[in-house]
Amino acid sequence: MLYRLTVIIIAALGCCQAIVAQEVDTIPYFDPEQVLVVEDDTTARAQLEACKMVAGKWIYSKPYVHAQGSSLIGKLGKPIAKSKLKKSLDKAYKKLKIKNRWSSLTLTPDGMWEMRVLGLPLKGNYTYEPHDERLTLRWNGIPLKSHTHRDGKKLYIAFDTDRLLLILHMLSGLSHSQTLKSLSFLSQNFSDVMVGFEMKSQ
């Protein structure tokens, strides 16, 4: 009797193992690395689509002002304050000879940029986030973030004051102190304002 019971238990256990083995064989193989590749590919495609929104060859047209908060622009009224600030920027840009020194900014659909200053190329890669209207140019490991949007054949790029100073230093080829002096009025009342360039398609 004991022998028969032992045989039944062993047979039952063997049957269970066979069922479990069969169930395991039917479970699809999960490859986490493959999932990551799919996600990376989707992200890359999305970024390429975003880059197409701002891609093109752009040349400087005139100063651009983007108000972020309730600074002097809000107190005086945006049209009046913007006009005043643009005039001051225009004088500074002319003093720095930006239009003569800066040939163009090219943004390619595959995320590369080139800026020609005095005939010499500056290059790097960029990313664009359309929901935040944020364009980030990377140059020698330095990220230059800007508020950027396109309207037809025009591209508007605005920087925080410290980033604008770096950009203008690059474009003018002048010492940082001379650039600071030309734009000293920005530190007085325009802390909540981003300033930069209105570009037109070439």
Image (cartoon, grey):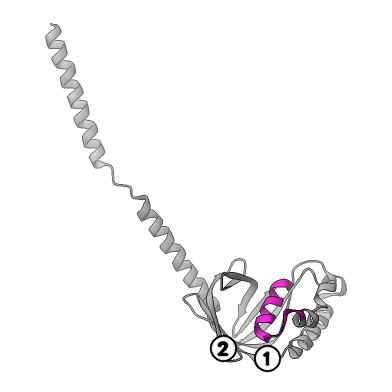
Please provide percent x and percent y for residue 61.
67, 89
Q: Is residue 160 among the parts visible in the rendering?
A: no
The residue shown at (18%, 17%) is: 9
Q: Secondary structure at mark 1?
A: helix
Query: Callout 2: 10 Å neighbours few (<14), some, many (20+)?
Result: few
Camera-near label (2 vs 1) is: 2
Magenta stretch containing residue 169, yes or no? yes
Q: Is residue 143 among the parts visible in the rendering?
A: yes
Q: What amino acid type is highlighted by mark number 1?
A: Lys
Q: Is residue 41 above or below residue 168?
A: above
Tell me if 25 is positioned left or right of 66 in this view. Answer: left
What's the mark number on residue 120?
2
Range covered by the magenta-colored residues: 162-177
Q: Secondary structure at mark 2?
A: strand
Q: Nearer the viewer, residue 50 or 185?
A: 185
Please provide percent x and percent y for residue 82.
80, 79
Location of residue 151 by image quarter: bottom right
Tell me if 24 is positioned left or right of 115 in this view. Answer: left
Location of residue 127 by image quarter: bottom right
Q: What residue is pinned by disc 1?
A: 99
Tell me if 193 is positioned left or right of 46 in this view. Answer: right
Please provide percent x and percent y for residue 111.
50, 74
Q: What amino acid type is highlighted by mark number 2?
A: Leu
Name which of mark 2 and mark 1 comes first in the sequence: 1
Please provide percent x and percent y for residue 7.
13, 15
User: Separation of disc 2 and disc 1 at Cα?
Assistant: 15 Å
Disc 2, disc 1: CB below 8 Å? Answer: no
Query: Callout 1: 10 Å neighbours few (<14), some, many (20+)?
Result: some
Rendered-image quadrant of the C terminus: bottom right
Magenta stretch containing residue 101, yes or no? no
Rendered-image quadrant of the N terminus: top left
| Furthest residue toward top | 1
